[in-house]
Image (spheres, coloured by chain):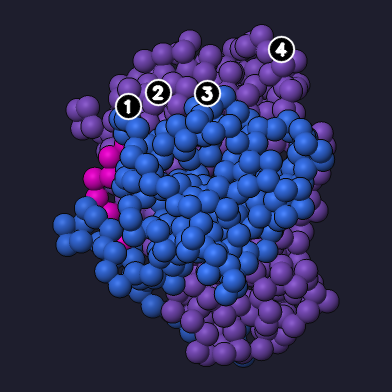
Amino acid sequence: MSVLVLVEGFNGEIKKSSLEAASYGSQVATTLGTEATAIAIGDVQESALAALGAQGIRKVLFDDDARLHNFVAEAYLKVIAQAASQESAKVIIFSNTNIGAALGSRLAVRLNGSLATNVTELPVIAGDTFTVKRGVFSGKAFADVNLTGDVKIVAVKKNSTEVRSDAGGSATVEKFSTGLTDADFAAAPKETVMQETGGGVLLPEAEIVVSGGRGLKGPENWHLVEDLAKALGAATACSKPVSDLDWRPHHEHVGQTGITISPNLYIAIGISGAIQHLAGVNSSKVIVVINKDPEAPFFKAADYGIVGDAFEIVPQLIEAAKAL
Amino acid sequence: MKILVCISNVPDTTSKINFTPDGKTFDKNGVQFVINPWDEYALTRAIELKEAKGGTVTVLNVGEADAEANIRKALAIGADDAIRVNAFPKDALFVAQQIAAIAKENSYDLILMGKESIDFNGSQVHGMVGELLGLPVIFPAFKLDLLDDTTARLEREIEGGKEVLEVKLPFVASAQQPMSEPRIPNMRGIMTARTKPLKVVEPSGSEPKTEYASFSKPEKKSGVRMIEAENAGELISLLRNEAKVL
């Protein structure tokens, strides 16, 4: 019996969300008196994998089949299911990425296991009971859920687990081959198009996000958002009206029907804070709201607020951020 | 073309969320329910495809009788018929098993739903349905077009970009914005919805794999700290030294 963690690669590196999953998994393993093994898939350098020792991973199974650089659900499922069976994994940890969520649900059925997604804390394990806390009602509540199946699959919400680097040692990396055939890649994408990322930071992975709303008056003023983001090493985002008006691409829209993020710091400029917007950002650790309307509802959800003209305030922030 | 659209009956986004005093059950009192917004993208896209290519759109809900108002709304928007599996949706696996059982009886060309429900935010049902039926699942899809009677072209969001896929029917896809523009039912739709068939069936057996033990609400924020616009730069030092996020 062991704990198995899925580690995803991106541009040769391990995704930060996977470092969080590894940190989570190794702590669960310690509680259960066992060890955590990682299964690494995707575009990642072998040399980066040994460093997972710092997150408490003792062994890494690495399938370096280049066809796995693109996410193909059927192929990924085979690799993970085979690793789970080889390691007799009773607990499997994913990050709640689009990949993790897509795999978790299929794997739960395939392994006849229990699945909880959007998990925000380490499990409480007492005897046979394995309970996790997960976010529900779009950030307005939490639920404690008992995973009663034999195999427990946990998809950890991004930025809810501290990445540990105290475990010491390095992980042994073992080649892992699943013998995938062309049929397993039949559903491979025809084409993959990567987005331009403002400051080079991917929005779903970002620790700091600078976001703009209609208060910025037009796409020609987005340099304010971009320059502040660049000065802070942040990703850029926007509200729904802004993406509906095509001032910014849809993939930057955060909110109820856009993407949900939970960065350490969310800075909202010229966004009034409709409840649909809050649903996408309300689990951010610190929220800053800049708005000319002192009655903007967003101030009620904010930690810091500035009432005033964004065109005067944001340049001051950029100056101060550059001076850090 | 036979399309199945699975919809969930969820509290409206603006609802205050409360639980019974023992924290074990969601308190429906005073809560208005809507069609899950993500499912609406799937529903309207299905109706657009039907309008362009012909065929039928069946709406499926796993839920209790109080979901019927929103099932009728889906019929008013343009679905042809509806099925309600008469059961409290215990967990994602339970719901997926009910959907899979219905799908096995009526071979659908497309099974669509939203990428998640805004109440339980699980994002699990589509993957489970695909696995139970042995079908590909495209999650989360924001574009869906039919190339011909056998193949669809989809665009799927991935972290940092998108993928373009060509997939043979049948398959499961979970919708997200901007797959379609949700519609408001018109008077004619509302009138005809009353006479469209809504079949109620009993659930098939299933053993849940998760138990919701209790619910809680996040701690309230301690209140906003306001900074004068003239000293906006002070914010940056507060974020570094007080909030410690820079």
Q: Give the range drawn in magenta.
A: B210-217
Q: Which of marks 3 and 2 is nearer the N terminus?
A: 3
Where does residue B86 sit, x and y in percent of width and height?
34, 46
Residue that badge 4 annotates = A181
Residue that badge 3 annotates = A38
Tag 1: Cα neighbours inside 10 Å, few (<14), some, or many (≥20)? some
Q: How far apart are marks 4 and 3 (CA)?
A: 23 Å
Q: Is mark 3 on a helix, strand or loop?
A: strand
Marks 2, 1 in one chain: yes
Residue that badge 1 annotates = A149
Q: Mark 1 lies on which chain?
A: A
Q: Nearer the viewer, mark 4 or mark 3?
A: 4
Q: Mark 4 lies on which chain?
A: A
Marks 4, 1 in one chain: yes
Q: What element carries label 4?
A: loop
Q: Which residue is drawn at 54% across and 33% down?
A: B106
Q: Which residue is drawn at 60% across and 77% down?
A: A271
Amino acid tagged 3: Ala
Q: Which of marks 1 and 3 is in front?
A: 1
Q: Distance between the residues labelled 3 and 2?
A: 21 Å
Q: Which of marks 2 and 4 is nearer the N terminus?
A: 2
Amino acid tagged 1: Gly
> Does the residue at mark 2 contact the one at mark 1 (Cβ under 8 Å)?
yes
Q: Is residue A181 visible?
A: yes
Chain letter, purple in picture: A
Amino acid tagged 4: Thr
Chain B drawing hue:
blue
State the image quarter where residue B119 is shown.
Answer: bottom left
Residue that badge 2 annotates = A112
Q: In this orientation, which residue lies closer to the viewer: A118 or B243?
A: A118
State the image quarter where residue B180 is shown.
Answer: bottom right
